[in-house]
Amino acid sequence: MAGPAGGGPLTWRVARLVERRVETPTAQTLVLAVPGWPGHLPGQHVDVRLTAADGYQAARSYSLAAPADGDRIALTVQRVPDGEVSPYLTDVYAEGDPVEVRGPVGGWFVWRTDEPAPVLLVAGGSGVVPLMAMIRARRAAGSRTPFRLVYSVRSPTDAIYADELRRRTRDDLGLDVAYVYTRAAPEGWRGEPHRIGLADLNTHGWPPDLEPRCYVCGPTGFVETVADLLVGLGHPTRRVRTERFGPTG
């Protein structure tokens, strides 16, 4: 594995927590200081490894939630009941405590700020995390590339980054955000809660003739469904990039 510029093999680095932000009742953003961090591209992820006092180790992959800020990186962690890593990170991990990180990982599911094609982002639940990194990188670079995010969540309280997305929709020219609610919708929302479908992507996405780059992230079933719908609408498979995680992701 190599870094964003195709450098040498990745190594484990000691990272320490410097900031914690609560995003939803089950999700938190952790800002880590990682001395020697080489930088990363929006859409990449890292491996996080914990080591117990008896030497037992557990590792999980987490998407990077924002562009690098010097030696600082941001991860948004969804607490998974009975998980080995996420409950520690959300409930126990304290400022100054160490964990090991390895990355950045991945070179396919990335967006580069010099790409001019319109971008369609489709997220399911915490799959919004790497897509938010792209939205934040767009703003940081002063890019005017048109972005559209279609975000599927169970209910309004499950929407990660809701306040920031509301501000960015208002302030970031060329960014549009639409929600699909699967269990409970806010008052005044048109329609009934439903799983994302062809009509949602047709209404809130880009038409294929504009040749957008499509990024889809979420649970495996969600990603497979959305990718099939996009191809059915006429988007070439080479322009549909996917990142998925299992049911406990």
Image: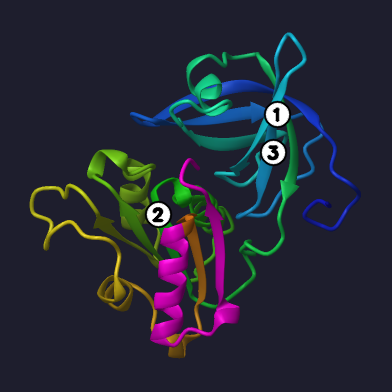
Do the numbered discs 1 and 3 sit on residues whose CB atoms are within 8 Å? yes
- Count of numbered marks: 3
Locate residue 214, reporting x and y percent: 50, 71
Q: Position of residue 15 (x, y in %)?
A: 71, 25
Q: Which residue is mark 1?
A: 49
Badge 2: few (under 14), some or many (20 or more) residues near its Cα, within 10 Å?
Answer: many
First-in-chain label (2 vs 1): 1
**Which sits earlier in the primary sequence, circle 3 or circle 2?**
3
The residue to which callout 3 is attached is 47
As helix, strand or loop, the secondary structure at mark 2 comes to strand
Is residue 111 positioned above or below 69 on the image? below
Residue 117 place in picture, x, y as percent:
54, 78
The alpha-carbon separation of the residues under discs 2 and 1 comes to: 25 Å
Please state the horizontal and vertical placement of residue 218, each as a whole percent of the image.
Answer: 46, 54
Question: Disc 3 marks which amino acid?
Answer: Asp
Which residue is depicted at the point 8% across and 54% down?
188
Residue 245 in magenta stretch: yes
Q: Residue at 50% across / 79% down in the picture?
A: 212
Q: Residue furthest top?
A: 53
Name the foreground residue: 87 vs 106.
87
Residue 122, relative to residue 89: is it above or below? below
Disc 2: which residue: 124
Q: Please, what is the three-letter code of the amino acid marked with disc 1? A: Arg
The residues colored magenta run: 221-249
Closer-to-camera residue (37/1): 1
Kindly report the distance in space between the C-alpha atoms of the residues bearing marks 3 and 2.
21 Å
The three-letter amino acid code for the residue at tag 2 is Gly
Query: In this view of the protein, can residue 62 be seen by the observer?
Result: yes
Q: Element at badge 3?
A: strand
